[in-house]
Amino acid sequence: MTVQKTYRISFLLLLLALCISFCVNISLGSVSIPFVDIWNSIFGGTVQEESWKYIVLNYRIPKALAAILVGSGLSLSGLLMQTLFRNPLAGPFVLGISSGASLGAALLIMGSSLVSGWIAYDIVSDVSLAVASSIGSFLVLLTVMVVASRIKDTMALLIIGLMFGSITAALVSVLSYFSNAENLQRYVYWSFGSVGNLSWTQISILFVLVLIGLLLSIALMKTLNAFLLGENYAKSLGVDIKKKRFLIILATGVLAGGITAFAGPIAFIGLAVPHLTRQIFDTTDHKVLVPAVIIYGAILMLLCDILAQLPTSAYVLPINAITSIVGAPVVIWLLVRKRKMIF
């Protein structure tokens, strides 16, 4: 069996797993709804309870779609970061991108405590939150890239990224101290991470942001393969390093920033899914990795959301905790089993 045929079969199995995960996700929840009624709710059939149709169309499907977008976007941003820095530890959290997004969201949410009246409520909207978070992540990543151009030691760069995270955390703490109780509570719940309670408008905005990052990534696949062999090799192929680096930064900033704005800082996905994909596909070709991490990330996020929502229970656990508790042992086991890291 040829490698290309093996890849096709693998992608078909992944797409099948994605469809199954999506169906399981929308079929589970605090309210028990027969799958026939879920099907009829989606395709306009007769439903026993009208409230079931509302739950399916306005809560479960948006939540499942949000999980797909969040998992795909974070996995793709993690792949871009690891390739750009040629470092397996690179990710939105490690280099401060999500921290910058959190600071942007905190400035908008808790900074409104310093503004009274209608202005405070007017500035905090779906669009403004996405813009503030994206700007915060983009500025942090851009700063990291400026430092990266002067420092060749990747470990030093990682430490600098962690320092950016510490600085943004300190600024968020200061904002928390001066914030009122309502805005502080709103930010805390946002920081737990969640793919639920998103309106169709928010889903639409998130889709546009993820689509922009995806299109940029597809356009950069050949460049990403060249970056794996070093900037000097990329230059020898005629790659405009500064331009391509800026586009990678832009794609990562839009993905990580936009997702963090709507879903909160989701851990593990951006760091681990690219490693899982490389181990399973046994390749570093981004023509394979880009679509693979998108599907893997979506499946993993759907599964984590299934565990987080505690089927038949009214309680929903923070998705941030589930992604780390479930995912980290899987990566550890896979790396120990393989005994090597493909990069």
Image (spheres, rainbow, N blue to C red):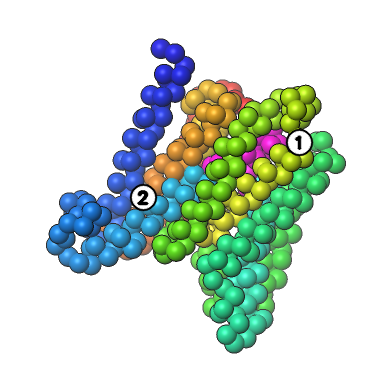
Q: Tell me which corner region of the image, top left, top right, bottom left or bottom right, holds residue 241.
A: top right
Task: State the extent of the magenta-drawn residues as a range.
Answer: 75-92
Residue drawn at the location 68% of the way across and 44% of the way down: 247
Disc 2 from disc 1: Cα separation: 42 Å
Q: Nearer the viewer, residue 65 or 44?
A: 44
82 within the magenta span: yes
Q: Is residue 105 left or right of residue 161?
A: left
Helix, strand or loop under label 1: helix
Q: Nearer the viewer, residue 326 or 29?
A: 29
In the rendered structure, which amino acid carries the disc numbered 1?
Ile
Mark 1 crowd level (few <14, some 14–19, many ≥20, 10 Å Cα): some
Q: Tell me which corner region of the image, top left, top right, bottom left or bottom right, holds residue 171.
A: bottom right
Q: Quadrant of the C terminus?
A: top right
71 within the magenta span: no
Q: Nearer the viewer, residue 45 or 106?
A: 45
Mark 2 / mark 1, whichever is N-terminal: 1
Q: Is residue 74 above or below residue 201?
A: above
Residue drawn at the location 56% of the way across and 48% of the way down: 212
Q: Is residue 318 visible?
A: no
Q: Residue 241, which numbered label?
A: 1
In the rendered structure, which amino acid carries the disc numbered 2?
Ile
Give the label, 2 or 1, closer to the camera. Answer: 1
Residue drawn at the location 71% of the way across and 25% of the way down: 229
Residue drawn at the location 17% of the way across and 65% of the way down: 49
Q: Is residue 325 left or right of residue 142?
A: left
- The residue labelled by disc 2 is 306
Q: Are marks 2 and 1 in contact (CB under 8 Å)?
A: no
Q: Quadrant of the N terminus?
A: top left
Q: Tell me which corner region of the image, top left, top right, bottom left or bottom right, holds residue 99.
A: bottom right
Residue 156 position in % (x across, y down): 79, 41
